[in-house]
Amino acid sequence: MSIFKAESLQIFKIKEFRLFILVRFFLTLAIQMQFSTIYLQVYYEYSKEEIYLGLIGLTEAIPFIITSFFSGHIADKVHKKQILSIGILLLLFGAIFLFFNSTQKLLLFKDLGLTALFSIVFLFGIIRSFLAATTNPFLSHLVPRHQFTNSATWNSTAWHTGAILGPVLAGIIYGYNNKFNASYCHFTEVFLFLISLIFLLQIKNKGLAQIHEKKETIFDSIKLGLNFVYKNKMVLSAISLDLFAVLFGGAVALIPAFTDKVLHLGPQAYGFLRTAPAIGAVLMALIMVMYPPSKKAGLALIWSVIAFGVFTILFALCKNYWLAFLMLFCTGAFDNVSVVIRHSILQLMTPDNMRGRVSAINGIFIGSSNEIGAFESGLSAKLIGLVPSIIFGGTMTILVVLGIDKINPKLKKLDIQALN
């Protein structure tokens, strides 16, 4: 424990890092609560069809992909704090809009229904492309290089803690007294976004973009970022592993339907089940704080993604609520191992003047694949059934890992310590 305090907690002496972690937590809490509420509204108030749950992901992924390359270019040219501030402010306005829409007290918002929900999801896809390109590069400005892996672990912990509480709050408030209370959920989100913005404004570091002597067009900038990722096989392999894991392992998007049709439970049960992966991720993060996956990072990356696929399959076979909770808990735990290792690779192997573009590309690979994976899960559930679609996703995840390991056998020999 003395090692834990001396090394792992040392980073919290940095005031701006502490503020960043608070921003990360409250922002994630608000976003997760908002999306959980939207999923519940779409499923329980409009249609109990899995395909609609998948369409939520697709609606976010399309604008995210379209704007990601541009957002990466901007993130390398503009103060990152400014980008984050504008993004959170827009999310705050979106939460206010959802509140009035769900209360339907104003004629302007009356009967907008699904259109309003999907419009906010579309808008969030655009905003998230800028957040994805900016957040981790901004963090790299706040901590010294030798603390990058440690900062990635605590950053992931803050994200997953918010991801735990967000769906729980949404499920409890939404299903309170057996009524659909979406307006109270969105009202809470307004304050959570506001709190995250207040903490962000207290950070003095602006995340200064490096000044380039050479003038380059946005297309040259995008091409440079793509070439860097393509030529760096270790970065490409790590990103690809997570890409296909979340693309095919999109069981989380189907939890509302799984809770209703397989476990025969309501919104409150959904909230707790939805948090299971995040709880597993937080506990795994605490383990990695004490025992960082550095020396054998590549091997840990491969086996963690395989384990993610295995527990996704086991989740699909569950008929008991707590057993399903345990399987999802394990998927989150092993997924977080790959997240921390991937973030460490990106921070340590990417030049500072390209972190925005590389983070944007990483966001396209990972961020959009979450949403496209949700659509894939919803579509496959419609075509082959709910449980078979989850099994298919877990199986494909395992096969992809084996394929990437064969293509790039050097990945399993990766040593993060050697990169510091």
Image (cartoon, rainbow, N blue to C red):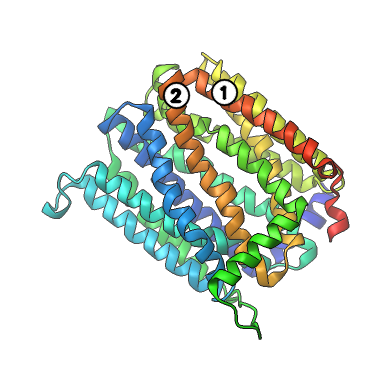
* Quadrant position of residue 296: top right
Residue 392 got which mark? 1
Local SS, label 1? helix
How far from the left and from the top, in percent, is residue 333? Answer: 66, 35
How far from the left and from the top, in percent, is residue 189? Answer: 38, 52
Can see residue 255? no
Residue 33 got which mark? none
Which residue appears farthest toward the top when viewing the image? 319
Residue that carries the numbered disc 2 in the rendered image: 381
Q: Is residue 381 above or below residue 122?
A: above
Can see residue 209? yes
Sequence-first disc among 1 and 2: 2
Q: How many marks?
A: 2
How far from the left and from the top, in percent, is residue 373? Answer: 51, 37
* Residue pictured at 64% horizontal, 69% vertical: 15
Which residue appears farthest toward the bottom when viewing the image? 213
Three-letter code, disc 1: Phe
* Residue pictured at 38% horizontal, 57% vertical: 191
Q: Nearer the viewer, residue 221 or 287?
A: 221
